Image (tube, coloured by chain):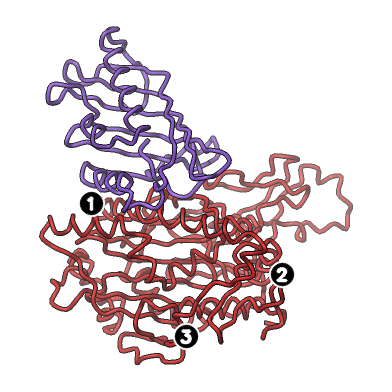
Amino acid sequence: MNDVTSIANGDPWVDTANGTVSREIFVSEDVFCLELDRIFHRLWIFLAHETEIPNRGDYVVRTMGRVPVIVVREASGEVRVLLNSCRHRGTKLCRGEAGNARHFVCPYHGWSYALDGGLISTSYDEHLPADMDKADWGLVPAPKVESYKGLVFAAWDPGVSQLRDYLGDIAWYLDTLFWRTPGGMEVLAPPHRWRARANWKIGSLNFIGDGQHVATTHAGPSTLNRLHSKKAGFFVRGGESFQVVTDEGHGCTLTYLAPGMPEGNYLTHPPALRDAYAEVLSARQISMMHHLRVMVGNVFPNLSFIENQVALGEKAVLIRQWQPISGTETEVLSWVLAEREASAEYKDRALKHGFHNFGAGGVFEQDDLELWASATQASDNPIAQRFPFSFHSSLPFDSAPIENARGPGRAYKPSNTEVAQLAFMRRWDAAMQPGD
Amino acid sequence: MDDERGIATVSDAAFLEVQRLLNREAALLDRRDYAAWFDLLTEDVKYVVTARVSRPAETGPLDYAIIDEDADTLRLRVLQIGDPKLTRAENPPTLTRRFVSNLEVEAAGPPNDYAAHTNLLVYRQRGTAPDGDFYAGRRRDLLRRDRGSLRIADRLVRLDHNVLFDGSLSIVL
């Protein structure tokens, strides 16, 4: 039994022994406020990809929980994360989503700041008392900012561990998506953004390991792509698959092509790029990628990733973020990436495949979103909250990892149990404890 | 042709022909009669929907595609939303009402091919939600004479949206 329990009826939020999770944590504003405190305003949170801000002064505006920030490449080339709020009266310095600036000037009273956040002028510096030190009145910087393979993260708790340590074994899998050629990956377009009328955790759970929803929720694209692929003379059949769980509640699901399938998946990468993989990745990582049809996963708390092959050759790498707005609302951001060295034609194709399936108009996305909204609506009442969600199909497998022959992390079979989802909830529960 | 500088006027007859086509098309989509709707498209149709990145005026606006389909992928998309067994987002069907207005028509390419610019407002109501939502945007259609009739060959919908309000776009605009 945990210290932190349901506000409504005293049951634990996460009961790993019995495989249940309270519905309350998927709707409650009180739980949401605690999550901001203990997760989003504390742990490493993904913000942007380096290639969104390639040049000095380039910035994007993002949110960490409730905290609006500017992610800017300053003069030295370093990425800074600054609270997007003037120190004088709080006005946002950047009111759009993206741009390029030489400095940030507040539109209200004219306070101006350098790209590194330092206060340049209040417009009325001659009226300031002699003992006011302008160095103390720069834009508030996030104390921790680090990148891993192009992925920029920040944290508001200066005591968090190094990002690389926080990522742990999941980094090995992230490498194969986000830095597999000498040039790394690049974002192909601005992120799609849409609102989901659902709690952010539903998205993270869906990506970390929810093999059970694919056949029912996504009957549309599954069925149509099968017909489509048959017409094209190739049907992408899944084979071996398993889930991987790593420390800190990160995890992913890997699905391979069925034995005897053409080497379609790996071979659909352009040959020039395939050769480049060996320059950057280990032989074991390349062997893991070989015949891999889908890798989908989540970095705790709200950074998801997927490389999926829906039909032959239709492959794209996506970053997905579940940005919490309230207990029952989430802003979803979705980026499509490709190897920097890839041809313009390949990038164009990857972008189209990427958001045909997963994006603001994605044929997969649209069905998920409607069902998550309905689960949220149906759970947002005290009667429903007496009855927790079932995570039972994790229990027979949770204590029995298999040998992970492909890579690091604890592996579990089959892939369509809820072991990875339970691992996410276990980590969430630990993060929510007062002493964690 | 995506911008609308110097739109040349066409004859009233041509204007009416275009207006008739777009009105009929809107009615078919509101009725979810996708088979009849497909018949109004050329076989090599392109369909693109963009959203906008909010940026400072000095930097200028940036539109980016959220949907970019050729005839094949458009067909897959529409087969999905048109089949109750294959869609969750559109079953029960959302109610839609399309308002297509502010039509401007210009001559484009071969005689009797046109570019049509319209404002689009779509009201959409989902399930038992107490209120509906709107999609708004400017549409640019390239219309081509094909198999004896004027048909839609290329559609660009520039949505006046930054963050899409509710999940994923599951209707045709």
Tag 1 residue: A345
Question: Toward the viewer: A252 or A97?
Answer: A252
Which hue is chain A drawn in?
red
Q: Earlier in the sequence, mark 2 or mark 3?
A: 2
Dot 2 and dot 3 within a common chain: yes
Q: Earlier in the sequence, mark 2 or mark 1?
A: 2
Q: Position of residue A58 (x, y in %)?
A: 51, 51
Occupied quadrant, residue A335: bottom left
Question: Toward the viewer: B134 or A250?
Answer: B134
Disc 1 or disc 3, which is closer to the eye?
A: 3
Q: Is residue A106 above or below residue A370?
A: above
Who's the residue at 43% across and 41% down the image? B94
Q: Position of residue A87 (x, y in %)?
A: 75, 52
Q: Quadrant of the C terminus of chain A?
A: bottom right
> Mark 3 falls within which chain?
A
Dot 2 and dot 1 within a common chain: yes
Alpha carbon distance from label 2 to label 3: 26 Å
Residue A8, labelled with which disc?
A: 2
Indicate the amino acid at tag 2. Ala
Residue B65, labelled with which disc?
A: none
Indicate the amino acid at tag 3. Leu
Who's the residue at 61% across and 64% down the image? A384
Occupied quadrant, residue A340: bottom left
